[in-house]
Image (cartoon, grey):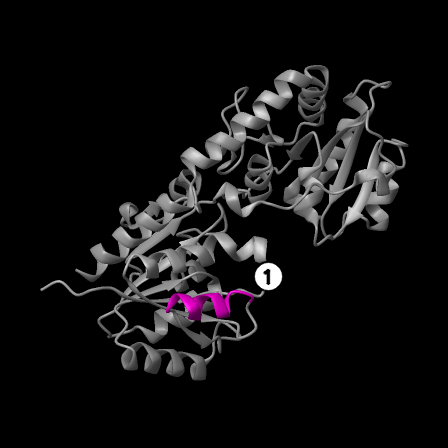
Amino acid sequence: MTAEPRVLCVTSHADTLNSIRPEAEVFIGCRQAGLHVEALIESDSCYADAFRRAGITVHPNFIERKFDRTAVARLRSLLQSRAINVLHLFNNKAIVTGLRAARGLPVKVVTYRGQTGNVSRLNPTSYLTHLSRRVDKITCVSDAVRRDLARHLSTPDKAVTIYKGHDPRWYTEAPADLSEFGFSADDFVVASVANLRPRKGVNFLIDAAAHLPGDAPIRILLVGRGTDSPQVRDAVAAHPGRFALAGFRRDAVALLAACNASILAATKREGLPKTVIESMAYGVTPIATRTGGSPELIEDGVSGLLIEPASARAIGEAITRLWQHPEQNRAMGQRARARLATHFHHNDTVTQHVALYRALSS
């Protein structure tokens, strides 16, 4: 006998609308497809009301840490009382708690993996999350993530790729006015939207300024937490007039939309980079390193440029190429937008989740 899926998604929606929208819209899409969907999220989530309007039962998220017996008991009770048969867990706190809560229950457990690295069969803590035998499927945000994870799974086909799809119609913000940074209409502005972490490669991007034509009106806008820190200010001082430091901005997408190109200089552990996707959505040509899922998003030389990681020279050469060929740059940006709509669309993500949930509950 086939049971209809009764899905409980446990996640964190404490971030901004743009960050959580692709995931949240999947829950709504599954509900619109006829599935019973419930969500355990923060009570102040900006999507809570939208979920309720869509017919999704919302439970306030009570999971505050990974090892909490009270949270395990509460989640177990919820699984039983709501007759949940598919439990989808989207972060490590949810995974550790959910796996313990589902023991002995007729519930299929799905985990979500959004980046490469940090999971290994040699690491005992990995068996508390994705490598647990209690996990039935793992949804991976890109093929790169799936391949990386499958190497450590005793049953590699547990890991499946479901791209976190987007809809170009979500991106309607007007491009920001960049004059606040002292840019002129003749400047070729490249945006880097990334928090200051070693793996984001901001140091290589700064060093790339030495490989740009000295007289070129190329400006690089650094956006993200920590990008206006004293250490970054000291580093860019060697390249006067080349960089503008925006720091954390809630209008980061609008700033990106106003630029001529974007750059993600990451060195490792990328899944399906949001900043590359947002750049594509606004028709801004993306440059990205060949890490994680970026090569799946970008067709090199067609809808953006792919370069080797940890190379300041490669970054400088890619930026220079786009500046020197403005028509080619604009064409790449438009093809990037079209590629997002045809290859990474939200509707496909919903369809694949519905199929997965129904297969697991049958």
Which residue is located at x 58 percent, y 21 percent?
331
* Figure quadrant of the N terminus: bottom left
User: Residue 270 appears at what percent x and percent y?
Assistant: 54, 42
Circle 1: residue type: Asp
Q: Quadrant of the C terminus?
A: bottom left
Left or right: 306 as drawn, with respect to 84: right
Q: Left or right of 241: which side holds 169?
A: left
Identify the residue at horizontal 72%, vertical 20% (top origin): 323
Tell me where residue 71 appears, x and y as whole percent. Answer: 44, 80
Which residue does the image show at 30% across and 56% down from the upper left? Answer: 33
**What is the secondary structure assignment of the residue under circle 1?**
loop
The answer to whether one can see residue 345 in this image is: yes
Which contiguous range is marked in magenta? Answer: 46-55
Q: Which residue is under mark 1?
A: 15
Q: Is residue 51 magenta?
A: yes
Residue 120 or residue 220, whichever sits in front: 220
Q: Chief secondary structure of the magenta span?
A: helix
- Within the magenta stretch, is there residue 129? no
How many C-alpha atoms fall within 10 Å of the one at disc 1: few (<14), some, or many (≥20)? Answer: few
In screen coordinates, is 286 left or right of 209? left
